[in-house]
Protein backbone atom coordinates (compact mmCIF):
# COMPACT_ATOMS: atom_id res chain seq x y z
CA UNK A 1 0.00 0.00 0.00
CA UNK A 2 1.25 3.47 -0.86
CA UNK A 3 2.22 5.62 2.10
CA UNK A 4 -0.57 8.16 1.53
CA UNK A 5 -3.21 5.45 1.88
CA UNK A 6 -1.94 4.17 5.20
CA UNK A 7 -3.42 5.25 8.53
CA UNK A 8 -1.38 7.37 10.95
CA UNK A 9 -0.75 4.54 13.42
CA UNK A 10 0.86 2.37 10.69
CA UNK A 11 3.02 5.27 9.46
CA UNK A 12 4.03 5.99 13.04
CA UNK A 13 5.50 2.49 13.35
CA UNK A 14 7.41 3.02 10.11
CA UNK A 15 8.77 6.37 11.33
CA UNK A 16 9.78 4.91 14.65
CA UNK A 17 11.51 1.96 13.00
CA UNK A 18 13.29 4.39 10.65
CA UNK A 19 11.82 2.63 7.60
CA UNK A 20 10.85 6.08 6.30
CA UNK A 21 11.70 9.61 7.33
CA UNK A 22 9.12 12.30 8.03
CA UNK A 23 10.47 14.35 5.10
CA UNK A 24 10.10 11.38 2.73
CA UNK A 25 6.56 10.86 3.97
CA UNK A 26 5.62 14.52 3.54
CA UNK A 27 7.16 14.64 0.05
CA UNK A 28 5.36 11.45 -0.98
CA UNK A 29 2.00 12.90 0.10
CA UNK A 30 2.75 16.20 -1.68
CA UNK A 31 3.66 14.28 -4.84
CA UNK A 32 0.29 12.57 -4.64
CA UNK A 33 -1.42 15.92 -4.04
CA UNK A 34 0.31 17.28 -7.17
CA UNK A 35 -1.17 14.42 -9.17
CA UNK A 36 -4.72 14.46 -7.80
CA UNK A 37 -5.56 17.89 -6.45
CA UNK A 38 -6.61 19.29 -9.85
CA UNK A 39 -9.35 16.63 -9.92
CA UNK A 40 -10.40 16.72 -6.24
CA UNK A 41 -9.93 20.34 -5.12
CA UNK A 42 -9.66 19.42 -1.44
CA UNK A 43 -7.53 22.40 -0.41
CA UNK A 44 -7.83 26.16 -0.25
CA UNK A 45 -4.18 26.64 0.76
CA UNK A 46 -1.21 24.27 0.61
CA UNK A 47 1.75 24.84 2.91
CA UNK A 48 4.50 22.75 1.35
CA UNK A 49 7.53 24.60 2.70
CA UNK A 50 6.23 24.86 6.27
CA UNK A 51 5.32 21.15 6.13
CA UNK A 52 8.78 20.08 5.00
CA UNK A 53 10.39 22.24 7.69
CA UNK A 54 8.14 20.64 10.31
CA UNK A 55 9.06 17.19 9.00
CA UNK A 56 12.77 18.04 9.29
CA UNK A 57 12.28 18.89 12.97
CA UNK A 58 10.58 15.51 13.47
CA UNK A 59 13.42 13.70 11.72
CA UNK A 60 15.99 15.30 13.96
CA UNK A 61 13.96 14.22 17.01
CA UNK A 62 13.91 10.65 15.71
CA UNK A 63 17.66 10.73 14.99
CA UNK A 64 18.24 12.01 18.54
CA UNK A 65 16.28 9.06 19.91
CA UNK A 66 13.45 11.20 21.32
CA UNK A 67 10.04 9.59 21.98
CA UNK A 68 7.53 10.53 19.30
CA UNK A 69 3.74 10.52 19.54
CA UNK A 70 1.49 8.64 17.12
CA UNK A 71 0.67 11.86 15.26
CA UNK A 72 4.23 13.19 15.25
CA UNK A 73 5.39 13.74 11.68
CA UNK A 74 2.06 12.60 10.23
CA UNK A 75 0.74 14.78 7.36
CA UNK A 76 -2.70 16.26 8.02
CA UNK A 77 -5.23 18.75 6.65
CA UNK A 78 -6.98 21.40 8.73
CA UNK A 79 -10.45 22.71 7.85
CA UNK A 80 -10.14 26.32 6.84
CA UNK A 81 -12.32 27.66 9.65
CA UNK A 82 -9.77 26.67 12.30
CA UNK A 83 -7.35 29.53 13.03
CA UNK A 84 -3.75 28.71 12.19
CA UNK A 85 -1.19 31.32 13.24
CA UNK A 86 0.56 32.77 10.21
CA UNK A 87 -1.42 30.59 7.76
CA UNK A 88 -4.40 32.00 5.87
CA UNK A 89 -7.76 31.02 7.35
CA UNK A 90 -10.47 31.93 4.87
CA UNK A 91 -13.57 29.95 5.91
CA UNK A 92 -13.84 29.55 2.11
CA UNK A 93 -15.27 33.07 2.06
CA UNK A 94 -14.21 36.02 -0.08
CA UNK A 95 -14.70 38.19 2.99
CA UNK A 96 -11.76 36.44 4.72
CA UNK A 97 -9.81 35.71 1.54
CA UNK A 98 -6.57 37.17 2.90
CA UNK A 99 -7.08 36.77 6.63
CA UNK A 100 -3.97 35.52 8.41
CA UNK A 101 -4.76 34.80 12.07
CA UNK A 102 -2.29 36.20 14.60
CA UNK A 103 -2.98 33.22 16.89
CA UNK A 104 -3.64 29.50 16.88
CA UNK A 105 -6.93 27.85 17.78
CA UNK A 106 -6.55 25.76 20.95
CA UNK A 107 -6.80 22.55 18.89
CA UNK A 108 -3.80 23.77 16.87
CA UNK A 109 -1.81 24.56 20.00
CA UNK A 110 -2.54 21.06 21.25
CA UNK A 111 -1.77 19.46 17.90
CA UNK A 112 1.43 21.47 17.41
CA UNK A 113 2.66 20.15 20.75
CA UNK A 114 2.99 16.69 19.12
CA UNK A 115 4.75 18.04 15.98
CA UNK A 116 2.32 17.29 13.16
CA UNK A 117 3.07 18.01 9.50
CA UNK A 118 0.36 20.38 8.31
CA UNK A 119 -0.19 20.04 4.59
CA UNK A 120 -2.63 22.89 4.23
CA UNK A 121 -6.11 24.23 4.83
CA UNK A 122 -9.07 22.24 3.56
CA UNK A 123 -11.95 23.53 1.47
CA UNK A 124 -15.42 23.80 2.98
CA UNK A 125 -18.82 25.35 2.51
CA UNK A 126 -18.48 29.08 3.19
CA UNK A 127 -18.54 29.59 6.99
CA UNK A 128 -19.46 25.87 7.28
CA UNK A 129 -22.94 26.54 5.91
CA UNK A 130 -23.91 23.67 3.70
CA UNK A 131 -23.71 19.95 3.20
CA UNK A 132 -21.90 19.57 -0.12
CA UNK A 133 -18.91 21.99 -0.21
CA UNK A 134 -20.57 23.55 -3.27
CA UNK A 135 -21.03 26.72 -1.22
CA UNK A 136 -17.28 27.35 -1.05
CA UNK A 137 -16.48 30.88 -2.20
CA UNK A 138 -13.52 29.50 -4.16
CA UNK A 139 -14.14 26.15 -5.81
CA UNK A 140 -16.14 22.93 -5.58
CA UNK A 141 -14.54 19.82 -4.05
CA UNK A 142 -15.15 16.51 -5.82
CA UNK A 143 -15.87 13.14 -4.22
CA UNK A 144 -12.84 10.86 -4.74
CA UNK A 145 -15.17 7.88 -5.31
CA UNK A 146 -16.99 9.62 -8.18
CA UNK A 147 -15.71 12.97 -9.39
CA UNK A 148 -19.20 14.02 -10.57
CA UNK A 149 -20.50 13.83 -7.03
CA UNK A 150 -20.19 16.00 -3.94
CA UNK A 151 -17.89 14.95 -1.07
CA UNK A 152 -20.55 16.09 1.40
CA UNK A 153 -20.01 19.07 3.64
CA UNK A 154 -19.31 21.34 5.10
CA UNK A 155 -15.97 19.61 5.89
CA UNK A 156 -15.91 18.21 2.33
CA UNK A 157 -12.29 19.22 1.70
CA UNK A 158 -11.13 17.47 4.88
CA UNK A 159 -13.03 14.25 4.09
CA UNK A 160 -12.04 14.20 0.41
CA UNK A 161 -8.40 14.78 1.34
CA UNK A 162 -8.37 11.81 3.73
CA UNK A 163 -10.30 9.55 1.34
CA UNK A 164 -8.09 10.36 -1.66
CA UNK A 165 -4.77 10.08 0.16
CA UNK A 166 -4.21 13.84 -0.03
CA UNK A 167 -3.94 13.74 3.77
CA UNK A 168 -3.50 11.00 6.34
CA UNK A 169 -6.07 12.55 8.65
CA UNK A 170 -7.86 15.86 9.01
CA UNK A 171 -9.67 18.12 11.42
CA UNK A 172 -13.20 19.16 10.57
CA UNK A 173 -16.00 20.95 12.37
CA UNK A 174 -19.57 19.80 12.91
CA UNK A 175 -22.47 22.15 13.62
CA UNK A 176 -25.21 19.99 12.16
CA UNK A 177 -23.37 17.02 10.65
CA UNK A 178 -20.40 18.53 8.84
CA UNK A 179 -17.89 15.95 10.05
CA UNK A 180 -20.10 12.86 9.98
CA UNK A 181 -21.93 13.39 6.68
CA UNK A 182 -18.83 14.05 4.51
CA UNK A 183 -17.06 11.15 6.27
CA UNK A 184 -19.99 8.96 5.27
CA UNK A 185 -20.04 10.26 1.64
CA UNK A 186 -16.28 9.73 1.28
CA UNK A 187 -15.98 6.36 3.06
CA UNK A 188 -13.88 7.49 6.03
CA UNK A 189 -14.36 7.75 9.80
CA UNK A 190 -15.60 11.03 11.32
CA UNK A 191 -16.35 11.87 14.92
CA UNK A 192 -18.26 14.78 16.40
CA UNK A 193 -17.35 14.97 20.09
CA UNK A 194 -19.76 15.90 22.87
CA UNK A 195 -20.39 19.65 22.95
CA UNK A 196 -17.65 21.06 25.19
CA UNK A 197 -15.27 18.11 24.86
CA UNK A 198 -13.03 19.98 22.42
CA UNK A 199 -12.28 23.69 22.75
CA UNK A 200 -13.91 26.00 20.21
CA UNK A 201 -11.39 28.79 20.87
CA UNK A 202 -10.10 29.82 17.46
CA UNK A 203 -12.78 27.99 15.52
CA UNK A 204 -14.48 30.68 13.44
CA UNK A 205 -17.97 30.69 14.90
CA UNK A 206 -20.95 29.58 12.86
CA UNK A 207 -23.51 28.59 15.53
CA UNK A 208 -21.74 28.70 18.88
CA UNK A 209 -24.12 26.45 20.82
CA UNK A 210 -23.74 23.68 18.20
CA UNK A 211 -20.18 23.88 16.80
CA UNK A 212 -17.59 21.22 17.66
CA UNK A 213 -14.21 20.35 16.13
CA UNK A 214 -13.42 16.68 15.55
CA UNK A 215 -11.28 14.15 13.66
CA UNK A 216 -11.74 12.74 10.15
CA UNK A 217 -9.54 9.67 9.77
CA UNK A 218 -8.91 6.55 7.72
CA UNK A 219 -9.85 4.26 10.60
CA UNK A 220 -11.19 4.17 14.15
CA UNK A 221 -7.73 3.75 15.71
CA UNK A 222 -6.56 7.05 14.22
CA UNK A 223 -9.79 8.68 15.37
CA UNK A 224 -9.02 7.75 18.99
CA UNK A 225 -5.48 9.08 18.67
CA UNK A 226 -6.57 12.43 17.22
CA UNK A 227 -9.30 12.86 19.82
CA UNK A 228 -6.76 12.16 22.57
CA UNK A 229 -4.66 15.08 21.34
CA UNK A 230 -7.40 17.68 20.82
CA UNK A 231 -9.82 16.98 23.70
CA UNK A 232 -9.79 18.66 27.10
CA UNK A 233 -10.76 21.68 29.13
CA UNK A 234 -9.67 25.10 27.94
CA UNK A 235 -9.93 28.30 29.97
CA UNK A 236 -10.24 30.21 26.69
CA UNK A 237 -13.62 28.57 25.95
CA UNK A 238 -16.21 29.09 28.67
CA UNK A 239 -18.35 26.28 27.24
CA UNK A 240 -15.52 23.77 27.39
CA UNK A 241 -16.13 20.84 29.71
CA UNK A 242 -14.05 20.29 32.83
CA UNK A 243 -14.82 16.56 32.76
CA UNK A 244 -11.81 14.29 32.84
CA UNK A 245 -10.68 13.07 29.42
CA UNK A 246 -10.12 9.33 29.24
CA UNK A 247 -7.42 7.78 27.08
CA UNK A 248 -9.55 6.94 24.04
CA UNK A 249 -7.03 4.39 22.76
CA UNK A 250 -8.14 2.23 25.72
CA UNK A 251 -11.42 1.85 23.80
CA UNK A 252 -9.65 0.13 20.92
CA UNK A 253 -10.81 -3.26 22.11
CA UNK A 254 -13.04 -5.48 19.97
CA UNK A 255 -15.88 -6.28 22.36
CA UNK A 256 -19.57 -5.40 22.21
CA UNK A 257 -20.85 -8.30 24.29
CA UNK A 258 -23.86 -7.16 26.25
CA UNK A 259 -23.88 -3.70 24.63
CA UNK A 260 -27.46 -2.48 24.23
CA UNK A 261 -27.94 -0.79 20.86
CA UNK A 262 -31.05 1.24 20.09
CA UNK A 263 -32.43 1.55 16.57
CA UNK A 264 -34.57 4.70 16.39
CA UNK A 265 -37.55 4.04 14.18
CA UNK A 266 -37.83 7.72 13.16
CA UNK A 267 -34.39 7.55 11.48
CA UNK A 268 -35.47 4.97 8.97
CA UNK A 269 -37.60 7.46 7.12
CA UNK A 270 -39.60 7.43 3.94
CA UNK A 271 -37.51 8.65 1.05
CA UNK A 272 -34.42 7.05 2.51
CA UNK A 273 -32.32 5.23 -0.05
CA UNK A 274 -33.07 1.50 0.13
CA UNK A 275 -29.42 0.50 -0.27
CA UNK A 276 -28.50 2.80 2.62
CA UNK A 277 -31.25 1.32 4.75
CA UNK A 278 -30.17 -2.27 4.11
CA UNK A 279 -26.52 -1.42 4.80
CA UNK A 280 -27.48 0.03 8.20
CA UNK A 281 -29.70 -2.95 9.00
CA UNK A 282 -26.85 -5.30 8.03
CA UNK A 283 -24.51 -3.39 10.34
CA UNK A 284 -27.06 -3.87 13.12
CA UNK A 285 -27.08 -7.62 12.41
CA UNK A 286 -23.29 -7.69 12.55
CA UNK A 287 -23.40 -6.05 15.98
CA UNK A 288 -25.94 -8.64 17.08
CA UNK A 289 -23.73 -11.47 15.89
CA UNK A 290 -20.85 -9.95 17.82
CA UNK A 291 -22.84 -10.15 21.03
CA UNK A 292 -24.74 -6.85 21.24
CA UNK A 293 -28.48 -6.72 21.77
CA UNK A 294 -30.72 -4.65 19.52
CA UNK A 295 -33.79 -2.76 20.57
CA UNK A 296 -36.15 -0.59 18.57
CA UNK A 297 -36.49 2.79 20.25
CA UNK A 298 -38.36 6.00 19.54
CA UNK A 299 -37.03 9.56 19.37
CA UNK A 300 -40.42 11.18 18.79
CA UNK A 301 -39.31 14.74 18.02
CA UNK A 302 -36.95 13.77 15.21
CA UNK A 303 -39.36 15.12 12.57
CA UNK A 304 -39.00 18.69 13.90
CA UNK A 305 -35.22 18.58 14.36
CA UNK A 306 -34.41 20.05 10.94
CA UNK A 307 -36.79 23.00 11.33
CA UNK A 308 -35.51 23.60 14.87
CA UNK A 309 -31.92 23.50 13.70
CA UNK A 310 -32.62 25.85 10.77
CA UNK A 311 -33.90 28.48 13.19
CA UNK A 312 -31.28 28.16 15.91
CA UNK A 313 -28.24 27.82 13.63
CA UNK A 314 -29.10 30.82 11.39
CA UNK A 315 -30.06 32.92 14.45
CA UNK A 316 -26.64 32.32 15.99
CA UNK A 317 -24.95 32.72 12.61
CA UNK A 318 -26.60 36.08 11.99
CA UNK A 319 -25.19 37.29 15.30
CA UNK A 320 -21.74 35.75 14.83
CA UNK A 321 -21.35 37.11 11.31
CA UNK A 322 -22.14 40.71 12.33
CA UNK A 323 -18.41 41.20 12.89
CA UNK A 324 -17.63 41.09 9.15
CA UNK A 325 -18.24 44.74 8.47
CA UNK A 326 -15.20 45.74 6.47
CA UNK A 327 -13.70 47.55 9.48
CA UNK A 328 -11.86 45.40 12.02
CA UNK A 329 -10.54 42.70 9.73
CA UNK A 330 -11.34 40.91 6.54
CA UNK A 331 -11.86 42.43 3.13
CA UNK A 332 -13.57 45.73 2.39
CA UNK A 333 -15.52 47.01 -0.61
CA UNK A 334 -15.55 50.82 -0.51
CA UNK A 335 -18.66 52.97 -0.62
CA UNK A 336 -19.65 56.63 -0.51
CA UNK A 337 -19.91 56.57 3.28
CA UNK A 338 -19.43 54.05 6.09
CA UNK A 339 -22.93 52.53 5.82
CA UNK A 340 -22.58 52.18 2.07
CA UNK A 341 -19.15 50.57 2.59
CA UNK A 342 -20.59 47.99 5.00
CA UNK A 343 -23.47 47.28 2.67
CA UNK A 344 -21.13 46.77 -0.29
CA UNK A 345 -18.72 44.66 1.72
CA UNK A 346 -21.36 42.28 3.00
CA UNK A 347 -23.45 42.04 -0.14
CA UNK A 348 -20.52 41.55 -2.52
CA UNK A 349 -18.31 39.29 -0.39
CA UNK A 350 -20.77 36.92 1.31
CA UNK A 351 -22.13 34.10 -0.85
CA UNK A 352 -25.82 33.37 -1.46
CA UNK A 353 -26.21 30.72 1.26
CA UNK A 354 -24.53 32.85 3.92
CA UNK A 355 -26.81 35.78 3.08
CA UNK A 356 -29.86 33.53 3.13
CA UNK A 357 -28.97 32.35 6.64
CA UNK A 358 -28.26 35.86 7.92
CA UNK A 359 -31.70 36.91 6.69
CA UNK A 360 -33.47 33.89 8.24
CA UNK A 361 -31.58 34.40 11.49
CA UNK A 362 -32.29 38.10 11.79
CA UNK A 363 -35.93 37.49 10.97
CA UNK A 364 -36.25 34.78 13.63
CA UNK A 365 -34.62 37.06 16.21
CA UNK A 366 -36.51 40.25 15.36
CA UNK A 367 -39.00 41.82 17.78
CA UNK A 368 -42.42 40.37 17.15
CA UNK A 369 -41.09 37.11 15.73
CA UNK A 370 -38.63 36.12 18.46
CA UNK A 371 -41.24 34.30 20.58
CA UNK A 372 -42.88 32.58 17.66
CA UNK A 373 -39.68 31.31 16.08
CA UNK A 374 -36.46 31.49 18.09
CA UNK A 375 -37.93 30.92 21.54
CA UNK A 376 -40.16 28.14 20.24
CA UNK A 377 -37.14 26.49 18.62
CA UNK A 378 -35.29 26.60 21.95
CA UNK A 379 -38.24 24.84 23.62
CA UNK A 380 -38.33 22.15 20.96
CA UNK A 381 -34.57 21.75 21.38
CA UNK A 382 -35.24 20.79 25.01
CA UNK A 383 -37.77 18.19 23.85
CA UNK A 384 -35.22 16.70 21.46
CA UNK A 385 -32.67 16.54 24.27
CA UNK A 386 -35.24 14.84 26.47
CA UNK A 387 -35.95 12.22 23.78
CA UNK A 388 -32.31 11.16 23.95
CA UNK A 389 -32.17 11.17 27.74
CA UNK A 390 -35.17 8.85 27.83
CA UNK A 391 -33.79 6.58 25.12
CA UNK A 392 -30.47 6.29 26.94
CA UNK A 393 -32.37 4.96 29.95
CA UNK A 394 -32.79 1.73 27.96
CA UNK A 395 -29.78 1.54 25.65
CA UNK A 396 -26.04 2.27 25.73
CA UNK A 397 -25.66 3.59 22.18
CA UNK A 398 -27.93 4.42 19.26
CA UNK A 399 -27.31 3.17 15.73
CA UNK A 400 -28.68 5.14 12.80
CA UNK A 401 -27.82 6.12 9.25
CA UNK A 402 -25.46 9.10 8.98
CA UNK A 403 -27.36 10.42 5.96
CA UNK A 404 -30.49 9.25 4.14
CA UNK A 405 -28.59 8.80 0.85
CA UNK A 406 -25.08 8.27 -0.47
CA UNK A 407 -23.24 11.15 -2.22
CA UNK A 408 -25.40 12.96 -4.77
CA UNK A 409 -24.40 14.64 -8.01
CA UNK A 410 -22.74 18.07 -8.02
CA UNK A 411 -25.49 20.57 -8.89
CA UNK A 412 -28.33 18.21 -7.98
CA UNK A 413 -29.47 20.01 -4.82
CA UNK A 414 -27.81 23.39 -4.89
CA UNK A 415 -30.79 25.20 -6.41
CA UNK A 416 -33.17 23.73 -3.83
CA UNK A 417 -31.91 24.69 -0.34
CA UNK A 418 -34.87 23.11 1.44
CA UNK A 419 -34.16 19.74 -0.14
CA UNK A 420 -30.55 20.08 0.94
CA UNK A 421 -31.57 21.03 4.51
CA UNK A 422 -33.72 17.88 4.78
CA UNK A 423 -30.61 15.78 4.11
CA UNK A 424 -29.47 16.79 7.61
CA UNK A 425 -32.26 14.88 9.35
CA UNK A 426 -30.00 12.18 10.84
CA UNK A 427 -27.19 14.44 12.03
CA UNK A 428 -28.67 17.67 13.44
CA UNK A 429 -30.48 16.09 16.44
CA UNK A 430 -27.11 15.23 18.04
CA UNK A 431 -25.88 18.80 17.77
CA UNK A 432 -29.12 20.10 19.26
CA UNK A 433 -28.68 17.65 22.15
CA UNK A 434 -24.89 18.16 22.41
CA UNK A 435 -24.19 14.43 22.03
CA UNK A 436 -21.21 12.64 20.46
CA UNK A 437 -21.54 10.70 17.19
CA UNK A 438 -19.19 8.72 15.01
CA UNK A 439 -19.74 7.86 11.35
CA UNK A 440 -18.20 4.58 10.21
CA UNK A 441 -18.12 3.16 6.65
CA UNK A 442 -20.45 0.14 6.28
CA UNK A 443 -20.48 -0.80 2.64
CA UNK A 444 -21.07 0.56 -0.83
CA UNK A 445 -24.07 1.19 -3.05
CA UNK A 446 -24.35 -0.59 -6.42
CA UNK A 447 -22.84 2.63 -7.90
CA UNK A 448 -19.77 2.06 -5.71
CA UNK A 449 -20.52 4.94 -3.39
CA UNK A 450 -19.68 4.66 0.32
CA UNK A 451 -22.39 4.33 2.95
CA UNK A 452 -21.88 5.18 6.61
CA UNK A 453 -23.66 4.40 9.83
CA UNK A 454 -23.66 6.63 12.84
CA UNK A 455 -23.29 5.58 16.44
CA UNK A 456 -24.67 8.09 18.91
CA UNK A 457 -23.39 8.08 22.48
CA UNK A 458 -24.38 9.49 25.83
CA UNK A 459 -22.90 12.89 26.69
CA UNK A 460 -19.12 12.60 27.27
CA UNK A 461 -19.21 8.90 26.43
CA UNK A 462 -17.14 8.95 23.25
CA UNK A 463 -15.31 5.93 24.70
CA UNK A 464 -18.28 3.59 24.17
CA UNK A 465 -19.03 4.65 20.59
CA UNK A 466 -15.34 4.39 19.69
CA UNK A 467 -15.21 0.89 21.16
CA UNK A 468 -18.33 -0.23 19.27
CA UNK A 469 -17.07 1.38 16.04
CA UNK A 470 -13.70 -0.34 16.47
CA UNK A 471 -15.38 -3.71 17.08
CA UNK A 472 -17.41 -3.35 13.88
CA UNK A 473 -14.37 -2.26 11.88
CA UNK A 474 -12.27 -5.22 13.08
CA UNK A 475 -15.07 -7.67 12.23
CA UNK A 476 -15.32 -6.25 8.70
CA UNK A 477 -11.64 -6.08 7.85
N1 LIG B 1 -25.55 21.06 6.64
C1 LIG B 1 -25.68 21.75 7.88
C2 LIG B 1 -25.79 23.23 7.63
O1 LIG B 1 -25.71 23.62 6.51
C3 LIG B 1 -24.55 21.42 8.79
C4 LIG B 1 -23.36 22.28 8.63
C5 LIG B 1 -22.29 22.03 9.64
O2 LIG B 1 -22.33 21.07 10.41
N2 LIG B 1 -21.34 22.95 9.68
O3 LIG B 1 -25.96 24.01 8.53
Image (cartoon, helix red, strand yellow):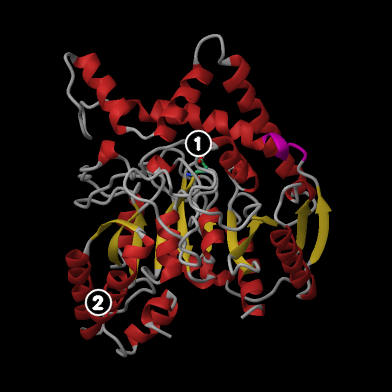
Residue 368: % across, % down: 55, 9
Residue 28: % across, % down: 29, 78
Q: Decide: is 434 above or below 321.
A: below
Give the prevailing secondary structure in the magenta stretch.
helix
Query: Which quarter shows the C terminus?
Result: bottom right
Judged left or right of residue 248, residue 121 is left
Foreground mark, 2 or 1, reads 2
Q: Is mark 1 within 8 Å of ligand 1?
A: no
What is the quadrant of residue 471 in the picture?
bottom right
Given residues 348 and 27, the one toward you in this image is 348
Could you tell me if residue 257 is visible in this image? no
Residue 21: % across, % down: 26, 83
Q: Which mark is residue 172?
A: none
Residue 206: % across, % down: 43, 37
What is the quadrant of residue 65 in the picture?
bottom left
The residue that mark 2 highlights is 27
Q: Residue at x 75, y 68 (%)?
A: 282
Judged left or right of residue 191, residue 279 is right
Q: Which residues are magenta?
A: 300-304
| Residue positioned most to the top | 368
Q: Which mark is residue 209?
A: 1
Q: Residue at x 23, y 35 (%)?
A: 330
For disc 2, the neighbor class at 10 Å (few under 14, some 14 to 19, many from 20) is some
Q: Residue at x 64, y 62 (%)?
A: 464
Disc nearer the start of the sequence (2/1): 2
Judged left or right of residue 282, residue 32 is left
Amino acid sequence: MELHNKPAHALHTMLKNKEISAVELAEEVFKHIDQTESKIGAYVTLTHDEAVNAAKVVDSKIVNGEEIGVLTGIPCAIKDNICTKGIKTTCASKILENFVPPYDATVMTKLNAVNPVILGKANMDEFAMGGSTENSGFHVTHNPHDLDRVPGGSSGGSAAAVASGEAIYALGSDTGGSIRQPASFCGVVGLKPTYGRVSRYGLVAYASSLDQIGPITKDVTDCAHVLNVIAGHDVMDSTSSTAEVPDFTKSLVADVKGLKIGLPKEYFIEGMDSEVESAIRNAAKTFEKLGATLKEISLPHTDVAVSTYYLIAPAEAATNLERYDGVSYGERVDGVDVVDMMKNTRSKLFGEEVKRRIMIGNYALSAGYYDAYYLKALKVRTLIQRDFTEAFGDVDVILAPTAPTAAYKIGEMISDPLKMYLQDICTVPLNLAGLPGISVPCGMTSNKLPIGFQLIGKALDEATIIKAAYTYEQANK
